[in-house]
Image (tube, helix red, strand yellow):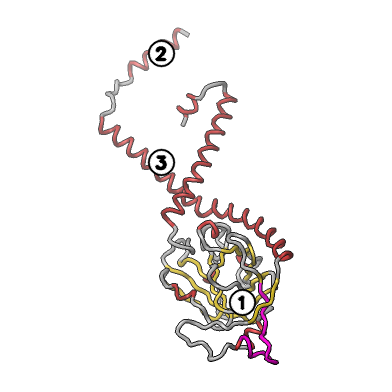
Amino acid sequence: MTQLTDAAAARAEEVPHLPPPSRGYRLMRGTGLTLVWLGALTLGFVAHQLWITTFFANQNQTELVAALEEHFESAEIVEVPYVPVVPPGETPPPEDRSIVSGALGAPELLRSEAPPEEGAAFAEIRIPSLPSLEDGWAIVEGVSLRDLKNGAGHMPWTPLPGQPGNSVISGHRTTYGQPFHDLDLVEIGDVIEVETALGTHMYSVKEIHVVEPTDVWVTDPRAGAWLTLTTCNPKFSARERLIVVAELIEGPNAEVILGRL
Amino acid sequence: MRRIYRALPGPTPVRIITSIVIVGVALVALHFFYEWVGSSFLDTGGTVG
């Protein structure tokens, strides 16, 4: 024991006595450590955006899909007169055809449901040609930051899917469940299905655009019944918007709307 | 990290449990911080990311 202690003391004497670290050294060390922590914090943020938000969005989707089934069973369906949509810059027809142009002079009726409350799931979107949207995503009413954290959101100032005009649905591309992650793989002619309390509305893709975020004309009303999907472009950036425009081809209201075009 | 762990009071099992609680609280705080950063500095509108 004494020998060990002596040996340790001898080694300690051999170690050169280091001077205390200078102020510059301490400053450099502190700066380096701060940068390392900031880097870790930034990497954590990226991981949070890409994976943690998707984890929570998927959890929310499970709840929304369950709520959607209840909504489909309990939603009140009404019939309303068909009023053709007049796109901006076009003149309306000379007479109110919605009242008098039915086969026997009676108005043609569309099936409709009451506008959903903001944040509530009211529809499901499926794109069979896209693996990420093959099984469907619940659509909530609203496109606020909170709404889109749950998945795809319907712009409340546009008609509901299956109704005349231009129904617009937005979704994240790389975060919060990334419902529209593969939207760039959609091709002209692909089918988009939107299931609501009225039934399944089927649309055929007619146009694909990449526009600036300020190009809000993509949400303008259109004659007939259209569905516009919007998301960020390119992936991992909000620099542009990818727009997919599809026309109604089949569904509970298709016969009335398409027959009147 | 090691210094913080050693500064925790109590025997080893208590230190471990305290460490887990501290890490859990830190992760929850980080989650809300990242949510705030994401919605305050990244989002530019309705359709983002």
Q: Earlier in the sequence, mark 2 or mark 3?
A: 2
Residue A217 sits above or below residue A239 on the image? below
Residue type at mark 3: give it. Answer: Trp
Rendered view: A234 above or below A187: above
In x, y percent, where is residue A106? Answer: 68, 88
A213 left or right of B18 in image: left
Give the residue pinned by disc 3.
A37
Residue type highlighted by circle 2: Ala
**Image coords of residue A227 (percent x, y):** 57, 75
Q: Residue at the far right: name it.
A: A73
Chain of the residue that carries numbered disc 1 in the rendered image: A
- Residue A38 is drawn in which quadrant? top left
Residue A261 visible in this rendered orientation of the protein: no
Local secondary structure at mark 2: helix
- The subunit letter for the residue under badge 3 reads A
In front: A29, or A72?
A: A72
| Dot 2 or dot 1, earlier in sequence | 2
Who is closer to the viewer here, A60 or A240?
Answer: A60
| Residue A163, disc | 1
In this view of the protein, which residue sits in the foreground, A236 or A207? A207
Q: Are marks 2 and 1 on the same chain?
A: yes
Front label number (1 vs 3): 1
The picture places residue A123, in percent across and down from the top left corner, at 64, 67
Judge left or right: residue A159 versus residue A108: left
Q: Residue at x 52, y 81 (%)?
A: A222
Q: Which residues are magenta?
A: A98-112
Quickly name the residue at label 2.
A7
Residue found at x 44% / y 72%: A216
Rounded to the nearest angstrom, the CA distance separating label 2 from label 3 is 41 Å
Q: Nearer the viewer, mark 2 or mark 1?
A: 1
Amino acid type of the residue that numbered disc 1 sits on in the rendered structure: Gln
